[in-house]
Image (cartoon, grey):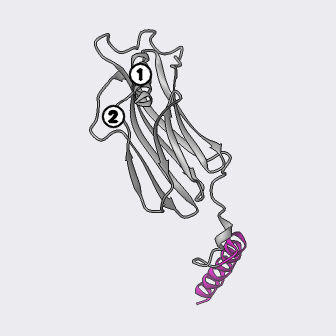
Amino acid sequence: MEKFTTAVAAAFVVGTAVGAVAWAGFGAPLGQADAGSTPGPDPESPPVSVSKSGGSCLDTRAHAGWVHEVAVGHSFAVTLNATVVHERGRTVDATVTRVTPGAYRIDLRTVPEETRSDEPEDKSPPEDCRAATDLRVSASLPTDYRSFEVTIDGRTLRTVENEDTTADLYQLPNPINATASGTARATATTATATAD
């Protein structure tokens, strides 16, 4: 009986200590958190995560080009999935920047591919295929953002306006053509459309 009482007393002390730490750390019981305690993402430098795979022949997947946004608590979650065709020896990087207050840019850029010393020198795709990178981007924007645009090497692919808090899915070109001929063709198309 004495061992049982000692065990209950020890559990009570540990429970009280853990409860006190939790109360001090969170400031309120579960379910009663202060609404101002989570300010949301930094508007000047929103958090972003980029993952990619590439250096292989283009394999266009159905429904691969899209951008999605939805309100999540104190922020808007924005996700992007794209396949980008580019010149050999290059890859794609992505950044998310604030252009003006409330306006953001998801900037996709083709950059020289870094090679490591332990990799074989000739790892480029065969001549009979187009080099491509599969890209996935996740970002968190403030709830009061007005718009964001998706660009490739400075060329705008899509502009999204913040109209509501529901989930919205927008198509992107599939694949996105970032080769020199693709950029020239897109510029010519834009110039023709402007002239009309």
Residue 115 at x, y = what percent?
52, 16
Q: Are marks 1 and 2 in contact (CB under 8 Å)?
A: no
Q: Amino acid at mark 1?
A: Ala
Which residue is at the front of the view, 85 or 47?
Answer: 85
Q: CA distance from mark 1 to mark 2?
A: 19 Å
Residue 168 at x, y = what percent?
40, 55
- What residue range appears in magenta? 1-28
Residue 45 lies within the magenta run: no
Residue 121 at x, y = what percent?
46, 9
Number of the label disc, if any, that sits on residue 188: 1
Task: Report the residue at 58% width, 44% height from top.
Answer: 104
Residue 51 at x, y = what percent?
47, 37
Compared to residue 91, the image places residue 42 above or below, namely: below
| Left or right relative to 93: residue 8 | right
Q: Of tags 1 and 2, which is closer to the observer? A: 1
Q: Which residue in the structure is indicated by mark 2?
A: 174
Compared to residue 162, the image places residue 183 above or below, namely: above
Q: Earlier in the sequence, mark 1 or mark 2?
A: 2
Disc 2 packing (10 Å; few <14; some 14–19; many ≥20)? some
